[in-house]
Image (cartoon, rainbow, N blue to C red):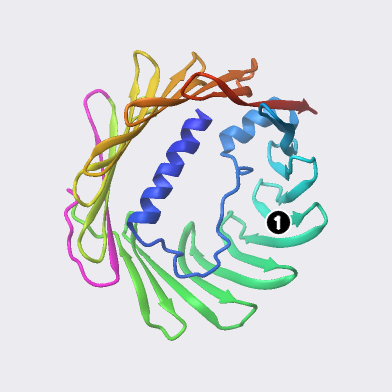
Amino acid sequence: MKRQIIFLAAVFISFFSTAQKNEYAYIKNSWWYTDMSYYSQKERDKIADAKISEYKMTRKTKKTEYVLSKMDYDKKGNCTSLIYYKKNGKPINQYLYEYSSDNKIINEKVLKMQKKEIKKSTFTYDVIGNCLEKTFSKKGKIKGKTVSKFDSTRVLESYYYKNGSNDYKRKWLYSYYPDKSKKSSVIYNAKGKVLYTWNYECKPEGELKSKHKDTTEVCKLEETDVNGNKTITVRKFNEKGKAYKEVRTFNKEDKLILYCRYADTGLPTNKCTYNAVTGNMEELIYYHKGKETFKSVNTYDGKNNITNTKYFHKGKQNTNVDYQYNPQSFVTITTYYNKKNELTETFKYEYTNL
């Protein structure tokens, strides 16, 4: 399931990053990045319950075998250290993480060769967990900082400061409807000029309400059928009025059973379909006027772990991947085969308990 989530997350990120402007797109050299060490609370609890203190991944090919990465955890399942290694066994970069008593990330460091600090991010929160300030430093010098103001759990204003300056470089103002759903996000430059606007004022059926330069409009519609399946449709209209759409359907157990993404032409670009009978998830990627280009098919076991993935290009299978798990549903071996079903590489995962 974790691999399914990661793959679909990449699909969603690709959709939003290519189709529309991101709300932080106006910050150059942004430090908003996600590393594989970040997990959901459910995954953290799973690691904590299994009392795992260390995780090591080894890569083996026909010519080499070496430790690719190693990760350390605290008793709450939080990653405290992540190290990537070269083939010769020497470390490349190390990521160090510190957490508050309520599991909020408060410090994040990147070290080169486990010695020299390259980057550092610090986070400050209020008593209810809202992130009030993020500061990013590079080689000991402050490169950027954001400060946010909240009303309860809603962010009202955010300011971006560059290179330790006391004057903001960018400003975001947010507004909300009475039901606390977001109404708009507007970004300004240091002189107060509107750079871009994100409106959430579409009609319920998802029709574009208005369009004008430097504006994106977002429409969201939720529907539940007689079988308890919930469908969420999101449309984003850019400044030219072109619509990009994604549709996600969840069954009554809150399992994703369908995901579709459409371009402004109305033709599909991605489609994921879950087969409840076979337990397979099929992913289709379309290019060139809706023609199928890539496809992947996932097979699951009774614990919802992916046991096999087959990848296809233009209808022909080119990669086959097998997964093995321990009794606690942590992956232990991943094996890759080429289109001739020849073994190409193997990843071994080892866990150390507290």
Residue that extends furthest to the bottom in the rendered view of this protein: 191
**Residue appearing at x 47%, y 83% in the figure:** 190
Amino acid type of the residue that numbered disc 1 sits on in the rendered structure: Asn
Q: Is residue 106 left or right of residue 223?
A: right
Q: Position of residue 329 (x, y in %)?
A: 60, 20
**Residue appearing at x 61%, y 82% in the figure:** 166
Q: Is residue 46 left or right of residue 220?
A: right
Q: Is residue 177 left or right of residue 41?
A: left
Does 173 appear above or below 153? Answer: below
**Residue appearing at x 67%, y 61% in the figure:** 121
Give the magenta-colored segment's residue range. Answer: 205-227
Residue 145: quarter of image? bottom right
Q: Position of residue 150 (x, y in %)?
A: 50, 64
The residue labelled by disc 1 is: 107
| Tally of numbered tags | 1
Q: Position of residue 27 (x, y in %)?
A: 50, 69
Q: Magenta stretch: residue 313 in it?
A: no
Question: Is residue 345 visible to us here?
Answer: yes
Q: Magenta stretch: residue 224 in it?
A: yes
In front of the other: 344 or 277: 344
In front of the other: 193 or 48: 193
Question: Is residue 233 visible to us here?
Answer: no
